[in-house]
Image: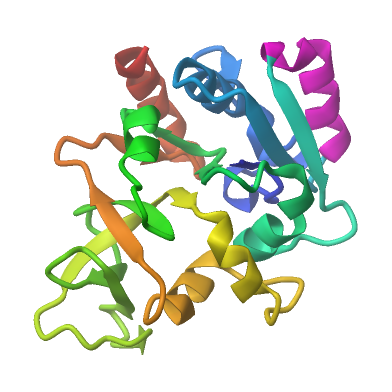
Amino acid sequence: MIFAAGLGTRLKPLTDTMPKALVRVGGEPLLWHVVMKLKRAGFERIVVNVHHFADQIEEYLNANDGFGLDIRISDERRQLLETGGGIKAARPLFDTASPILIHNVDILSNIDLSRLYDSTGDADATLLVSPRVTKRYLLFDEDMRLNGWKNIETGEQKGPCTAASPQMFAFSGIHVFSPRLFPLMDEWPERFGIIDFYLKACADSRIYGYLKDDLRLLDVGKLDSLHEAEQLVLIDN
């Protein structure tokens, strides 16, 4: 699933007339880069959620015949559902016999998506993480099992936070979600964040971090990141 519904406010004024998913990097839209990366990794069915300038995304995919893939639209025109709500709403569009790889449309990286997907084993969720500097970190125990979340600037914490010496890593916006978790979403509202869901579920569910030592990752969420994104695209391709 590609999260492409966001408003892209940090990319204004570009997103005043187009969705973030269609902002170009290296001559092609961000959506193209993620779709091609998934296709090269062997994925055949992709769900794309839409909200902001949804018609433009649908027209782009139709004009390119879905790039030869089974691409399905999860329509959030009525209301943005956030990351957790977006997964919950798209449930009928997935093959629920297999894990679901989730990828933000504005994330470019050198991660081998097929290797990440195949690494999940019996985990209920696997989150790609890195040691990059941020204010908000996910906390993991010695086995890299999710144990909490912390804002190091404010001291706020969420989740069990029971590990004596937690490892702190930043979330990448790429993760693998097992359909076994869908029943736990039944009690959640229509709109919620997936990290909040994982933090509540991690005490009883097997939610792990996946650390790639040489990870190159860029959140193309701001105008000043577009030039850097051009360089990363050249390296990744």
Residue 158 placement: quadrant = bottom left
Residue 83: image location, x then y, percent: 61, 59
Residue at the image point whose x is 33% and y is 87% from the top: 160
Residue 61 placement: quadrant = top right
Say whether residue 224 is left or right of residue 8.
left
Indicate how the structure is coloured in the image: rainbow
Q: Quadrant of the N terminus?
A: top right
Residue at the image point whose x is 90% and y is 58% from the top: 78
Asked if one can make out residue 44 in the rendered structure from this viewpoint, the answer is yes
Residue 210: image location, x then y, percent: 27, 50
* Residue 65 sits inside the magenta stretch: yes
Say whether residue 98 is left or right of residue 60.
left
Residue 153 placement: quadrant = bottom left
Residue at the image point whose x is 35% and y is 47% from the top: 120
Asked if one can make out residue 14 in the rendered structure from this viewpoint, the answer is no
Say whether residue 24 is left or right of residue 215.
right
The residue stretch that appears in magenta: 54-68
- Residue 162, compared with residue 206, is above or below; it is below
Residue 171: image location, x then y, percent: 36, 57
Examine the residues drawn in magenta and state their main secondary structure: helix
- Residue 142, compared with residue 227, is above or below; it is below
* Residue 10 sits inside the magenta stretch: no
Residue at the image point whose x is 51% and y is 75% from the top: 196
